Image: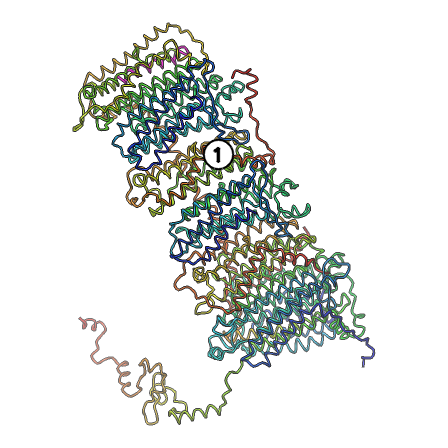
Amino acid sequence: MFTADLPPITGPDVEYSLIAPILIITAAAVLGTLVEALVPRTRRFGVQAAVAVVGVLAAIGDTIWVYQSLDAVKGGGHSGRGQISTEGALSVDGPGVVTWLLLLVFALLSFLLFAERRLEGGLSAFTGRAADAPGSAGEAEATAARIEHTEVFPLASFALLGMMVFATANDLLTMFVALEVLSLPLYLMCGLARRRRLLSQEAALKYFLLGAFSSVFFLYGVALAYGYAGSFELGRIAVAVSSRTGSDTLLLASIALMAVGLLFKISAVPFHSWTPDVYQGAPTPVTAFMAAGTKTAAFVALLRVFFVAFGGATWDWRPTIWVIAVVTMFLGALVSIAQTDVKRMLAYSSIAHAGFLLVGFAGAYVGTTDRISSVSSVLFYLTVYGIATIGAFAIVTLIRDAGGEATHLSRWAGLGKASPFLAGSFALFMLSFAGIPLTSGFIGKWAVFSAAWSGGYWPLVVIGVLMSAVAAYFYVRVIVLMFFTDPVGDGPTIAVPSVLTTTVIAATAAATVFLGLVPGPMLDLAQHAGTFVR
Amino acid sequence: MTAFWILAPIMVLAALGLVLARKAVHAALCLAIVMISLAVLYAAQGAPFLFAVQIIVYTGAIMMLFLFVLMLVGVETSDSLVETIKGQRLMATVVGLLFGIVGVLVIGQAVTGAVTGLDEANANGNPYGIAKLLFGPYVLAFELTSALLITAAVGAMVLAHRERLVPRRSQADISRDRMREYAETGRHPGNPPTPGVFARHNAVDTPALLPDGRPMPESVSASLVARGQVRDGFDDDVDDIAKAIEPPPHAGWPFDQEGDDQ
Amino acid sequence: MILTVMAAVPLLGALAITLMPRGQSSATAVKVVAVAASVLTLVLSLAMMADYDVGRGGYQLTEKHVWIEQFGVHYALGVNGIGVTLILLTTVLTPIVLLAAWDDRLPTSRSVNSYLAWMLVLEGLAIGVFSATDAFLFYVLFEATLVPIYFLIGSYGGPQRTYAAVKFLIYNLVGGLLMLASIVGLYVVTSRQGDATYLIGDLSNLDVSTTTERLLFLGFMAAFAIKAPLWPFHTWLPDAAASSTPSTQVLMVSVIDKIGTFGMLRWCLELFPGASDWASPVVITLAVISIIYGALLAIGQDDLRRLIAFTSVSHFGFIILGIFAFTSTSTAGSTLYMFNHGLSTAALFLVTGIMIARRGSASIQDFGGVQKIAPILSGVLLVAGLSSLSLPGLAPFVSEFMVLAGTFSRSIPAAAVATLGIVLAALYILLMYQRTMTGPLKEGTEGVHDLKPVEVASLAPALVLIVGLGFYPQPLLNVINPAVDEIVSHVGVGDPAPKTPTGLAQQTEGGEH
Amino acid sequence: MTEYITLSMILFTIGAVGVLVRRNAIVVFMCVELMLNATNLALVAFSRQHGNLDGQVAAFFVMVVAAAEVVVGLAIIVSIYRTRRTTTVDEASLLKL
Amino acid sequence: MLELAWLLVAVPLVSGLGLLVWGKEGDRVGHLIGTAASSFSFIVGLICFFQILGRDEGDRSYSKSLFTWIEAGPFHVDMAYTFDQLSGLFVLLITGVGTLIHVYSIGYMEHDARRRRFFAYLNIFIASMLTLVLASDYLVLFLGWEGVGLASYLLIGFWQHKDSAAAAATKAFVVNRVGDVGMALAIMLMFAQFGTTAISEVNVSVNAASTSTATALGLLLLLGACGKSAQVPLQSWLLDAMEGPTPVSALIHAATMVTAGVYLVVRSNGVFDASEAARNAVIAVGLVTLLAGAWIGCAKDDIKKALAGSTMSQIGYMMLAAGLGPAGYAFAIFHLITHGFFKANLFLGAGSIMHGMDDDVEMRHYGALRAAMPVTFITFLFGYLAIIGFPGFSGFFSKDKIIETAFGHSFWVGLGALVGAGVTGFYMTRMMMMTFFSEKRWKEDVHPHESPKVMTYPLIALGALSLLGGAMMLGGWITDFLEPVVGHAEHEELAIPAWLLSVLITLVVAVGVALSYVLYSREPIAAETPADESVSFFSRAGRHELYGNELNEAVVVRPTRHLTRFLVFLDGKGVDGFVTGLADRLGDASQLLRKPQTGFVRSYALSIFGGSLVVVLALLAARLA
């Protein structure tokens, strides 16, 4: 009855070509869900994997196209490349598209690991039927029937979708929804390990509870930001911040609470405590995906929120980030020394790397076109960190004993002799993590440190290098274990992977060396991406 | 404003109830109170649409889901009052108090500026305004929620759904099988009597007695049989027990026995 | 181009060795390839000497390509006299070391392929380090040298090898990372002034505030002081030396540790002359402490390898002392000392390595009277030892005296205390010689037979050079002097003039002469 | 206005404390829901203050998100319950140190 | 020939190195080649010497630069030699006595399997010593200086299988190194002060420098001289050095090397002329050593050690003379040369005795050897007469002059020198008595016999030189000859005439001789050394070398050892301990910090909640601050 009186609601204006990579991934995910329903079980796994991988590949291609056309769509008035699309929900800008590219590449590598089926005798690393209690007859039955949860592919695709939107969200509401879109599938996938399912379920529960808890903080921060600025859009908030319209304390509380949610996702101290438990418990391919993808997406989102929305309050948040960076580096590096489990150790290393990334962030250096800025340094660091992390976790999947992956460090003794190339690759990743020159990790460290120093924080650089020395200690210990120590007893077996995992390891190792020797193109990409579009 | 001042204490108390109630169901009910009160506040704040959604979705659907799961895992479960993590409760209280105080003082008091009110925004009705935003700036988020819902559905399926691998065996199937087995191997389709039936003792190691007085070894657990711990359950046991109860005929005092040993 | 080729040859040799089959049957072929690669490098280095114009000074044989444009990093090589000297040291020592490693008994199941390959890698990297004229490239190669040594110690060393390898790596990494901070700082500083650059030519005219310069200097110095090793950052060296094979010891102490002193000379002094001058009192003090402390500790050692390691601490003290005295004499002396110390320590490590291998113990107490059954061995040990205690007529003396003489004109107390080191040097070498070689033959020492021809062949070049350069160091000094003069004038402190120059005296005395 | 935000803050804090002190995973999760509700209250209140409906839309989204989250969360809790026959979060502490 | 004077050094050097490298095949001819090289140098030296003799008095110094040794910045050292009057005399002494000792060694070392090596070392010594005296630059001099130290080290420790020999060699080298510190610092000071280290230029330039510089330079050089010449306080190595083969003791530790200190002082006359303080220090050192050496010589029963004490004492005389300035330089050199003759004679004689006594050095096992070894006895007697200053023998002239000049300087110095002469008479007579006279105290199965001719001929030659060496003083030839080098000295008139002083000296010596004769002929000499407790303090102290070793042990060695031990401890626990401790602390911290990772999700939530509180507060604080 009111219809006639109301003005019509005009349809939204969506730049489909710009956000096509997101749409492609969405399509792949939805298609995957349909495959789950329609394709017979025997062929489902292959089809699912193919859909996911093809979707990602298509998205990669499209992302490259989008990146190249960014200049064309550049509007006047802002310094960055790209534009805000979809009614202000997404900002398809240089850093954002580069992040898409990174996320897609990480996802591609991780999906290859997801699809690996040779290690478990023709079954994937995911449990056959999650509803069965571990060790129950049902579980054995499911294993015997060789059923698999092929849903991980659409789930992972949804997570990827969430990550991509998270990194490019231009309003806080979209960001929050994207945060949940990326988190929920990960919560689920953490609990799907085939082996050590008790740990896996526990990891899922912990990740879920803490994730939900921290995202509420983020949300409250969003609410306060809305209360401060009256809008969720980053650009509008930035205007409010620079014009100092609202109450400062409201702004500060908003910054703080949003930081909590974002720092949780990148596992910065003191919001890191979920990381080791979840990384250890989750199925290793998922850990790889999570470690590389979540951190990348969350970090870019963090940069976006802080540089775009709160750029006017830099002097308020920089000291705190400074301290968090130091504490994170310190704790991550230090505690990893005492770890005896490879996955936990990599988790703590991931915490330490969050600290190093924060160093680049704390520099808050905008830079000029020909100089390394905080954004470009962090993008580069994320690239090298993500690649090496996926490679390292890929190797973790191969070192096995009767109980599945042999993640206890003592089982890695003498690996260098048993399989020099595998151990050599792992050593390479460790050296890259440690920041030894001629590996990509070194260039990454250099980049974030130079961003910090350019921003005027040279003491942070000094602390950073000292912390890298501490961190190096445990990377070096792993090398000692693999190459200088003789195996205890039989030593673990090294499973022969299919071409999928082999490809991942080879590609990541090659990229680690390549980016160490010839970082120019990637740096160019990161630097050319320019600044965030407001 | 009146509604607020009535509802606010109720909500706080209910929230405290949620935290303090020992039984999960009580906690759930407390939460429901908060939610319904909130709905009222939404209405008071010019958000009729949310009022409805809060009641329907939150209180209706979500809380029901909670209660449903509570039923599933045991409605009677209640937390023990002993805190197992040292200092957790103290620290939680301290941090909570500080956070609350800071929040209330710094944030709550910081909200300044005139209240614009929603009259203008709600000019075409609250749902219209919301719809305009939903299909405007927030269309992407709106579409994203579909991904969320699919994820939730798939997730629930993955974790809770047991795919049936073998055809379901009905009672008819079972009885048919039993009879066939009886025909082929002679295995009795009925249950064997439990140990101790008609026997002198009803202990698990005593076989049941058949009506004809014969013991039935199958009634005793196979593992006891394997270990040879089965009593025969016949009258000679009585003598044994009598011996155990009564002292032996020429038993002396304990110290005499010692002397005898020498 | 020749510098690149020279660095590439050993690396390619290493690659070839890695690809060769492992095991006993191919061991000899592997060794031949390794030695051939190193000899080819030596020949190339001689060709480089021929190409190098001694009189011209400055950086020669340069090449430059953009490497990482965004950082202003170039692949830039070039050598001055100092670089030439140290490259020569590297190329001379590597064949010797590889020959000496011919019979090394490696821990079971370790392949000789990777052992020799790592050494060749080290040679290639060292040549790169000594010829890099881009600070970033230098840093990268500087840090990269850690990896081969780490594996050489960790895989092929003695019982404590793991501990020693980790200690070595972490210690050096700490220094290296502090230097990384300075490298980053250089980028920040140069990019603020225009285009970012790491080329030494651009950096040496850097216009920075005093504080910044000092901070940057400290970062570089930290890395070099640990590498060199300067007291009190020396404690990694004895452990590393005691846990590695003789060949590793030589490459580590004679070649790679020189990067520390080389770096001070090339990077600290050229880039941060003001800060170097500012820090010189402290550095000189530490250097003098190193000299005395290293010598006293050498006296107190029972393990031959630790003893030599501590003598090196003492000798590095001299080198650093000479560098930071900023006189052309002492600096030239330091550069020459780097070369000479390389030779004499190589000889010492190799000959004691042979002793240790034959005796099965590195403890001095387990030796005695070896001279009787192994006269050539003992003779070689004595010559190497005498060169280590800087006996005039042997190469190290010339350099040590130049260091002291130069230092004396700058700081008498430093020179005076440092000179006491020569007494202690006599003590640690001769007591060691006395305990191991003289007296009645000790039980258990019978197995220490005399040197074999291949061992003599590997040691002879070093000994010949030690004696030859003792009497005629001028060819090397001619190469070194122009570079040193440039550096000293760059620091700008200048040589102290003689207080009573001869000419003056002659005038006043009215030609009594 | 202030009183709404204050109430929201109080509820949020109570919820957070609840997460810390309750051991039943379901109750913990309910406390998270309380926090979400508190946030919604703030959003709605701010919405009225600023005179636009963005806050209300946000609250609406939060409800949807909460619904999805509840499904996933309860599924996880149920699956743990199937294995361990308990919903106490303290029991799930195999992963540590 | 002068331009070929570098052959003096080169030939023995090449011969020495060649003999070392040459394998076993060289054993047959090694000694011959070595002797030939030494003889060659002697001949070249002789030719050169006569060439400069043939020149004008003012033009007798010949310098030649062979090549630039070191050049860097202002530091420039030429490998150059100067053949002048002073070095010429030394060349003759070194090569002459050296050649004789080479010849002697052919016999003495005949049965030693490593004789080739011995000759190689001797040749290296000759080369180094000639480098030392021919050097026209202090740094080149230092090259020779250390070269003779090395040769001395090698030769003292020649019988390495004896621990004592090896230890003595080490000690000699190390103590010399202490002196070298002075030497090295002196050269550095020259470089810093004058910009050159050429001897001639330094000696001139020092006049323009301040007295304190000259004093410092003088004292530093004196320290070097003390080390090399076994002067107090660096005397302790010389007696131990007697562990070496006797020809070595004769050549290096009596005739040539140990006098290098005297040579250095005389060579640096310009420096010492410029500083009276430095001269007085030289005198003091000389005087103290003179008396100390004599004292030790009186108490030792080991013939070589007794002679070594005597050597110390005689060098003390030379040092004393050198400290007297231009007046004494020539006499120092004169005494140095005569001492070279007679002390080499005495040592070789001692070697000959040991050769016949189965290498026994204990004089208490000798006695009445004059009949068994007539040639040795006669030549030894010549040496004896020369050293005690028997009129007509070489020592008479040289010592006489020194004591005379000492009295000219100061009565007390003269008196000291005079007393020393008396003591010399005492201990030398004691040696003669114990060795050749008194009764046989030979051990069983020892059959003393005369040495072969190859050993006795050098003895005869040296005996002759002991007698005739004084001829150089005829007409004051040596003072005149050396004057262009060491400068002119006005002869000071003493309060008493020179002849009276000579008589007085002779009387004092006679008293010493007589006292000794009486003491050692009155009652039979014990065949075993009396216990320390049964002898007087003087004997005891003398035997213990005036407790010099004990002093060194207490003042230098033990503190050094303690310091070393302490530093080893400090390095492990302190310097390294700090680092490893740091690593351990990090490990501890790591263990501690992993504790909060309890596995309880509620603890993690608490850290998030607490963390968010902290972040909120931090941001607020940052704004307020």
In the image, farthest residue toward the front: E1
- The percent position of residue E159, horizontal first and vertical second, equals 29, 33
Left or right: E224 with respect to A368? left
Q: At which x and y percent is residue E445?
A: 16, 29
**Residue nearer the viewer, E578 or D94:** E578
Tell me the quarter of the picture where residue A15 sits.
Answer: bottom right
Does the magenta run of residues contain A362? no
Instruction: Give the number of marks.
Output: 1
Q: Which residues are magenta?
A: E407-429
Q: Quadrant of the N terminus of chain A?
A: bottom right
Say above or below: C76 vs E509. Answer: below
Q: Is residue C291 left or right of residue B38?
A: left
10 Å neighbourhood of mark 1: few (<14), some, or many (≥20)? Answer: many
Considering every residue shown, the one lying at the far left of the view is: E444
Secondary structure at badge 1 equals loop
Question: Label 1: which residue?
Answer: C473
